[in-house]
Amino acid sequence: MRYSPADVPDQTGRFVIVTGGNGGTGFETAKVLATKGAEVLIAARDAKKGERAVQEIRRMTPGAQVRFERLDLSSQADVARFAEARRAEGRRIDVLINNAGIMALPKRQASADGHELQLATNFLGHFALTARLLPLLKGGRTVQLSSIKHRSGRIHLDDLNLERGYGDWKAYDQSKLAMLMFALELDRRSRANGWGVTSVAAHPGYARTGLIGAGPLGSRPVSRFMFSVVYRPFIEPLISHSAADGALPILMAATAPDVSPGGYYGPTTGKELKGPAGPVGMKPHARDEVTAAALWESAERLTGVRFG
């Protein structure tokens, strides 16, 4: 039977944080969770879009417990500020959905901390956020957003910031492989250290959001023209699904009672570009425990944040 929002269990009394919940699959995820009774905190960089997302969810579900707080995941100082505010509130976090991301920036950009921007936003920010919120996540669940692009990703341990050979997709693929490896390593370390956190990963397939247009296909005049006139109306519908459908694997990973710790969820047909949500496979290099441990140590060094 095809998984749908109707299969999401009642979330009354649960507190969920969704990074990047102001648009795309993050918004669709936050919307369903709020509809199911969860208290949802949307954490994102764009305050205007964030407040608009909150208003839209409240319009669709009067009385929804949803709010917005600004969070720039590329800034370690902002991650620390956001996490400290949550710890001051003392509210237990039932689910942390690390969804926010940027894709395939044509030119290498650096964060305020000097890290390659896709690594900083997609992975390092979420790594540090999870570590800083760990005391509030006991007995809870984390969902790390990966991608089918993890398949072509490689962890460049000798040059994580790609200072010696940047490529737009090279950086994106590395960041999404890092998120998948982080989910698996967090599961291993949680079980070994008794942290009590269920760690899983998910990917939305090819969901029709603003990510593609904002990145690889919308950055140059010719690309923007081809994207709007040819790609979006004729090609994209054949190989993609809606943002709402892309959110289903995320919702399954975040709420299914029988979720497998260390599991990976995504579309199960169409080479995982689209289709029904369910458990999916991953490339063998994503399960490399030696590289995952080295990546973890590098992330602790780059962020200055340690787990436990």
Image (cartoon, helix red, strand yellow):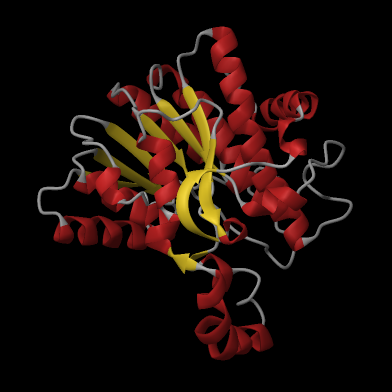
Q: Is residue 108 visible?
A: no
Q: In this view, does 4 lie to the left or right of 168?
A: left
Q: Where is residue 74 in the image (x, y as percent from the top left)?
A: 58, 46
Q: Please report the residue visible at 44 percent of the width from the left and 45 percent of the height from the top.
A: 250
Q: Which residue lies furthest to the front in this view?
A: 1
Rendered-image quadrant of the C terminus:
top right
Q: Position of residue 90 (x, y in %)?
A: 30, 21
Vertical relation: 199 (above or below) 246: above
Q: Residue furthest left?
A: 62
Q: Please report the residue visible at 56 percent of the width from the left and 28 percent of the height from the top.
A: 262
Q: Please report the residue visible at 72 percent of the width from the left and 42 percent of the height from the top.
A: 283
Location of residue 165 (image quadrant): bottom right
The residue closer to the viewer here, 45 or 103, is 103
Q: Please report the residue visible at 36 percent of the width from the left and 38 percent of the height from the top.
A: 17
Q: Is residue 291 left or right of residue 308?
A: right
Count of residue discs? 0
Q: Is residue 61 visible?
A: yes
Q: Where is residue 154 in the image (x, y as percent from the top left)?
A: 79, 45
Location of residue 184 (image quadrant): top right
Vertical relation: 38 (above or below) 44: above
Vertical relation: 307 (above or below) 53: above
